[in-house]
Image (tube, helix red, strand yellow):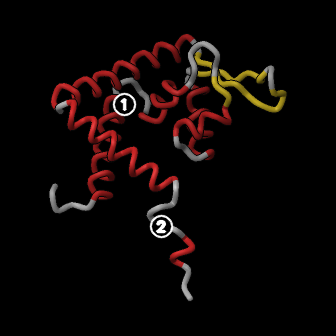
Amino acid sequence: MKDKTIDYVLRTTWLAVNKMYNEEASEFGTTMATGFALLSIDPEKGTPSTSLGPKMGMEATSLSRTLKTMEAKGLIERKPNPEDGRGVLIFLTDFGREKRALSKEKVLTFNETIKNNVSSEELTNFYKVAEIINNMISNKQIYNKKEHILK
């Protein structure tokens, strides 16, 4: 992978992880997006629907479709937010909690397997590089639009 670009390695690795999780999820009649949503919803207090998208890094349209599917499958229920009359809280049903536990087990298995095959130094460096990339993107240090305006 030495001659590959950083974005290529990130993209192909993420696609492989995505495919792996979707294959696992399909055995339970669900998707990785649903599993991720289950893990992102507070199992005790529920989660405001408005904070779920940013928490998951999903666009509102995709999240809305995922939540509709989850509601239809009986994984979640929506309730008015008592602190904000306009808002909605998303709660896990008992069935949703069961599926959340399965999703959590899959994620923990993935993490443990990687940790067992990568040194702690390599993993620390991986996290450092990922954090640097995220910070540079967030702070627009890669493509600063002001620098790219045609004159």
Tell me if 73 is positioned left or right of 103 in this view: right
Of labels 1 and 2, earlier in sequence is 1
Q: Decide which of 87, 26 is in the foreground and name it.
A: 87
Q: Amino acid at mark 2?
A: Tyr
- Relative to 3, is 133 above or below? above
Farthest right residue in view: 85
| For discs 1 and 2, the disc positioned in front in the rendered view | 2
Write the residue at 37% across / 29% down: 25
Image location (x, y in percent) of residue 150? 54, 85
Which quadrant of the structure image shows residue 109? top left
Which quadrant of the structure image shows residue 82? top right
Write the residue at 52% across / 30% down: 37
Look at the image and tell me in which quarter the N terminus lies. bottom left
- Relative to 143, is 62 above or below? above
Write the residue at 36% across / 45% down: 130
- Relative to 40, is 146 above or below? below
Q: Which residue is mark 2?
A: 143
Write the residue at 81% across / 27% down: 84
Q: Amino acid at mark 1?
A: Ser
Query: Marks 1 and 2, Cα distance to the nearest angstrom?
Result: 38 Å
Image location (x, y in percent) of residue 6? 29, 57
Tell me if 107 is positioned left or right of 88 in this view: left
- Relative to 133, is 36 above or below? above
Q: Which residue is mark 1?
A: 26
Image location (x, y in percent) of residue 45? 64, 16
| Disc 2: CA contacts within 10 A as few (<14), some (14-19) or many (>=20) | few
